[in-house]
Amino acid sequence: KTSTSAAAAAAAATPTPTPVPVRQAAAGRKYTIQVWHPWGGTTVTKVFHIADEFEKTHPDIGVKMVYSANNLSTSQKFFAAVAGGVPPEVIYVDGPEVAGWAYHGVLRKLDPYYATSKLGVNNFWTPVWNEIHYNGNIWAMAWSADPNFGFFWNKDVFKEVGLDPEKPPTTMQELDDYNAKITKITNGKVERIGIIPWGVYGNANSMVTWGWVYGGHFYDDQKKQFIANNEQNIAALDWMVSYAKKFNITNISGFSSGFGQLGLDGGFIQGKVAMQPFGPWELPNFKKYGKGFNYGVTYIPAGPSPAKPHQSWVGGWCMGLPTGSKDPDQGWEWLSWIGADPTGTEVAMSAVNDFSGSKTTPYLKKQAANPELAPFVKILEATLHQRPVTPVTDYFMGSLDRHVGAALYGKATASEALAAVDKESTAQLQQALSGK
């Protein structure tokens, strides 16, 4: 147990986090909307730029932007604001949280706004459209649509080991074959590896990614049951576990700890990891820190037959109108401008270097003409999946994280791990739906 004096010394030595600035609304506006957002660092200045442009095109509305921690486990401030009758006009909500927030009654139904604006399924990517629905109603507007994921390969490493640098693996069998040629182990120490299967942004995201690649599925909406424990997902997790066993997951953890602050980005740039799924948001790091190295981006390899290729999925942030907000109509102006307007979608997504949930935005053509982004446009056009749309998707992803980790470390078989996920998550869902 840490002593009081040691704890005090540690606290004193810990730097105080830099507070995220508040953007004040333009003066003299008829309406002022509060927009609560989850970004700090350099991103917040980009978000403020979007508000500047919004105010230019909406002379009656001023935008006050306030930071509010908001992720799969941190939303207490927002829920308290709704309960207290003082919510903002706009709240950012992580995509898998939309159904849960709708279930808990903290978001307004947006069906009338969509109808008035003549927006519907043909305006949005199908997985995005699915994710903003729950129980027959629409509850959010997409802020972004992450094409999960691009498959990156290091052309320099390919050339070094005798692989064609212009031909990435197109199947999982080829991926394994390429990994065998690339991986270098000396005296039991990993010096280079082809791919780290569980490195796709954590165990849970890795599992859904490879599960869909193998043709798996995770949820039965008709029966309201999680069904992760199926033949295809078991095969996908067995494949992940095979790498953990063959190369010793503890050794790989030690190996990856040497990648530096950039983490897996750094390992890829340094040529220590030659193949890895990444999102387009990593491109600035590769450009800034990876000068002189060559890489390509394509679809994730296809799973074994009968799995079909291009099994990508959509992630990303959404925006909602909180229950009880003072000026919901003006809040909708923000949502619809950023999420569906030709000008607004370009302003917003060019600022944050991301893709819109709108598939009809003219900005998509500009992104398709950009050599760096063009592969992601193709991936986004092929997207088929989104995480399960349920009130307990955050719990499900947490359960996946825990039990996939247990399988990777040899504490459970793939089937045992996925069965535990189904049992826990379905029980949690049934409890939520029963109102207990």
Image (tube, helix red, strand yellow):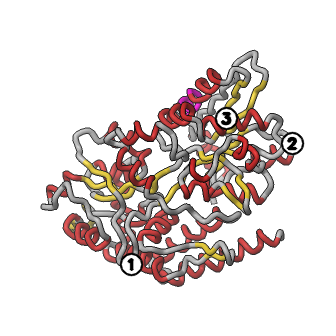
Locate the N terminus and report the quarter of the image it occupies: bottom right
Q: Amino acid at mark 1?
A: Pro
What is the C-alpha distance between the residues marked 3 and 1?
Answer: 44 Å
Is residue 330 on the magenta stretch? no
Q: Which mark is residue 61?
A: none
Q: Amino acid at mark 3?
A: Trp
> Main SS of the magenta segment?
helix
Q: Is residue 401 visible?
A: yes
Q: Which residues are magenta?
A: 44-49
Q: Position of residue 229 (x, y in %)?
A: 54, 80
Q: Earlier in the sequence, mark 2 or mark 3?
A: 2
Query: Which residue does the image show at 64% across and 80% down from the upper left?
Result: 423
Number of dots carrying numbers:
3
The residue carrying pointer 3 sits among few (fewer than 14), some (14 to 19) or many (20 or more) residues within 10 Å by Cα, namely many
Q: Amino acid at mark 2?
A: Gly
Query: Which residue does the image show at 50% across and 37% down from the upper left?
Result: 349
Question: Which residue matches tag 1?
Answer: 306
Locate the C terminus and report the quarter of the image it occupies: bottom right
Q: Secondary structure at mark 1?
A: loop
Q: Is residue 5 visible?
A: no
Question: Which residue matches tag 3?
Answer: 334
Question: Which residue matches tag 2?
Answer: 85
Query: Which residue does the image show at 39% across and 71% down from the upper left?
Result: 308
User: Which sits in the foreground, 164 or 337?
Assistant: 337
Q: Position of residue 149 (x, y in %)?
A: 42, 56
Above/below status of 375 relative to 1: above
Side of 77 relative to 160 (left or right): right
Above/below status of 310 relative to 259: below
